Amino acid sequence: MRVNFVLSEVASGLRRNLTMTVAMILTTAISLGLMGTGLLIASMISDMKEIYYDKVQVSIFLADDVTEEQRQAIQSELESSDEVKGFVYESRDEAYERFRQQFAQQPELVENTPPDALPESFRVELENPERYQVIAAAFPNGEAGVDQVRDEGDFLDRLFSLLNGARNATLAVAFVQAAAALLLISNTIQLAAFNRRNETNIMRLVGASRWYTQLPFILEAALAGLIGGLLALGGLVLTKMLFVDRTLAGPIKAGIITSVDWGQVLGTGAFITAAGVVLASVASYVTLRLYVRL
């Protein structure tokens, strides 16, 4: 009987404040959806870093007037360096052939680029990609046949800085929405408690505990959080199906960006749903303790 009574009170409370309940659910769903999106973006960035930074190379471009002795000296120093994991020498002809393959879709660019425009180089893979400065210091620009030393990590740092900014912006908006959702939950619970103050006062007079009178309100908030979390999960599923699997199919297949598998989506969805239930329940309980006398 007690369980049936509590459940009936929950259903009654949701019906009485239907518009505010819907607003609470939608606000919670949006905030949780943004949070889940931010977490998935963070996961993608982490996977991309592992892939890209593992392949980062330092390019040592040789001068046009480099001599065979200088070339051999550079190669010997690379072979003896503990910082170097491996390296490949690329001649002018090999560089031009690679250029033609990379820009095969832009024939005008290839035609206007003479074969001798691309310098010969050493492409160096480091044991620790973050120690690029060691190689740069060992082969100063303009000395000993070296024209320029270029680190691919600089571009990656700028790229991931941009991606991290997008992730942080998404999470910031999510936290603002979460704060709005918590305030809306608090106001909804206060209104619900005020509308049912006569019922709860009678229950207290006949011996009902404070916890028993508060439980229906907490369950209302928890249910709203659960529905909001499930809607957010649905949004993540649609994002995976319509955006990741379709719009980003080309870059993913080319290995430019990493995919998001269903395990990540469902795991993130379960986390944000649980977070929605817990946060809504805690917000309801705190509101009842601080602002409502039941």
Image: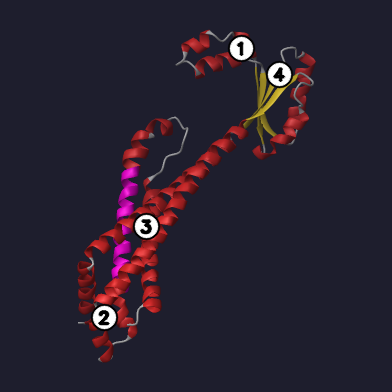
Percent position (x, y) of residue 13? 23, 71
Q: Which one is closest to the eye, mark 4 or mark 2?
A: 2
Residue under pointer 2: 197
Image: magenta residue range: 218-239
The residue carrying mark 1 is: 93
Indicate the amino acid at tag 2. Answer: Arg
Tell which tag, 3 or 2, sits nearer the viewer: 2
Which quadrant is home to the C terminus? bottom left
As measured in the structure, the alpha-carbon distance from the residue carrying label 3 to the one carrying label 2 is 35 Å
Between 10 and 60, the one lying in front of the other is 10
**Mark 4, residue position:** 62
Q: Who comes first in sequence, dot 4 or dot 3? A: 4
Name the spot of residue 231 as percent of width and height, x first: 30, 54
Which of discs 4 and 1 lies nearer the camera? The answer is 4
Secondary structure of the residue carrying tag 3 is helix
Can the viewer see residue 42? no
